[in-house]
Image (spheres, grey):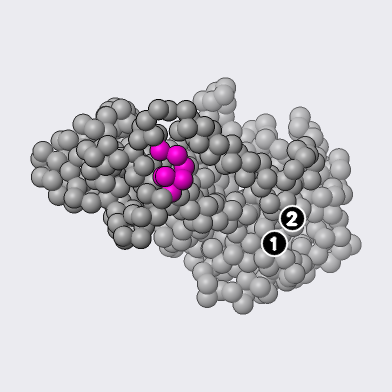
Amino acid sequence: MSQPAGAPTIGLGAHWYRLLSVIALLALWQAAASGLADPALLPSPLATFEAGYEALRAGELLYHVGATLARVAVAFGLAMLIGTAIGIALGRSPVLDHFFNGWLVIGLNLPALVTIVLCYIWFGLSEAAAILAVTINKVPTVAAILREGAKALDPALFEMTRVFEVKPLRVLARVVLPQLAPSLMAAARAGLALTWKIVLVVELLGRPNGVGFQIRSFFNFFDIASILAYSLAFIGAVVAIEVLLLQPIDRQLGKWRRA
Amino acid sequence: MTGLVLSAVTRAFDHPVPRTVLGGVDLTIAQGEFVSLVGPSGAGKTTLLRIIAGLDSGYGGSLAWQGARPRLGVVFQEPRLVPWLGLLDNLLLVGGPESVDRARALLGAVELGDCDSALPGQLSGGMQRRAALARALLVEPDFLILDEPLISLDAALAERMRRLLNDFWRKRRTTTLLITHNLAEAVELSTRVAILSPIERRVVADCALPPPDPRLSGDPMVAAALQDLRRMTRSWPVPDPAEAAPDRAG
């Protein structure tokens, strides 16, 4: 990444600092692992990578991470869609906003665990109940962020589209959604982080596969190396989504601001 | 038929302080007329535009279209271009993808032919204003409303844009309402000039002119009309800024 003009120089390039930071973390981990009498309590980085490689070779790692990512994708997509629609409605209609504000506050503060347990009790230990629980948890966050974005939509542009009788779908695609892009990105980021954490709990409590399910199994066997290996693999997948998907979208959407 | 009849139109605002902006405006614009509404800043010209464009329904009196409600083309005082769309896309937003050839031609006509993909933020205020003018003409309006469309253009460019507006009107006879505080501009382009007084807050004079087909400079009749109108507006407490600084560059 090139340094922007006028930015303070920091000696080495930014890449090097990131690399040094990773090495420092690994060294700290290694030191902590070596300091403990029982290596099973905190396996060394090498032991963890071995456990991960073993799981990868057996095909288990990809299967379970894949199952979790699929749940994250479906729940995330549903929550973004429903939350965005609710957020725009609340942001554009003061009546709806006043009426539903209390509901939104309840939704935002409802503990994820309660929703998950209730969904499993009411709808059984099914895939649909799991997805529903995650979606319900995330919708209020998305709606709250989009509500603020929708409140800030430029009225002058709406007036322009009104006098020129621009078709509603075209207004949505070319005028409304681009203005909501920063809110959508913020909701996506906050939502993704929240979703995958909740998905793991959902899996731990009531699914037969996925990273959460595996972590429960490893907990029963006191297999800390595998717990860490799965966690790292999953963090890697989420970071990849951020770098390969969200950041390029963000750059594309922000182009006109930098013009 | 796309005429417009305003009868005793009033508009008052409560915020920030209670005030009456329009105190009973009577104005009739017949099909095919080019009417200029002249008044100093604060006379209520833009308020009247918003009422006519259907953006403000809190007025008193009556507004009636003769025939069906017309397709409007509006140039707002601010360009109101969509900042993340290039100029051509801004035009296509209102004209639809099928109008791409006409949109390009109109951008050329307002001397922005090489700025198709430029974003509004990359252009000067005057260029944005011309793009807004092209957008209003693109929809082939039945009724064209122009709110100070040439205000930030330099004298030579404003002259060329006046010629463009005159050509457009002569070819299509689109019913047009030009809001301006520049009397000379109003007289050059219009078939009628209405004066909106900042004191009475209504139309106090309505002066018919020969059709600008085109208006010849130095026409004694035009000079006389301009002189009459100037005399009428001289006593206003708010000076006409266009008279004080007629050649604003931008």
Classify 10 Å Cα crowding around label 1: few (below 14), some (14-19), many (20 and above).
some
Q: Which residue is mark 2?
A: B123
Does the image show residue B196?
Answer: no
Mark 1: amino acid: Ala
Q: Which residue is mark 1?
A: B118
Which quadrant would residue B91 be assigned to in this image?
bottom right
Q: CA distance from mark 2 to mark 1?
A: 8 Å
Does A46 appear in magenta?
A: yes
Q: Magenta residues, as a range?
A: A43-49
What residue is at 89 percent from the left and 62 percent from the top?
A: B218
Q: Earlier in the sequence, mark 2 or mark 1?
A: 1
Could you tell me residue A178's position as x and y percent? 51, 52
The answer to the question of whether label 2 and label 1 lie on touching residues, with beta carbons closer than 8 A, is: yes
Observer-nearest residue: A137 or A232?
A232
Q: How many numbered discs sit on the rendered protein?
A: 2
Q: Amino acid at mark 2?
A: Leu
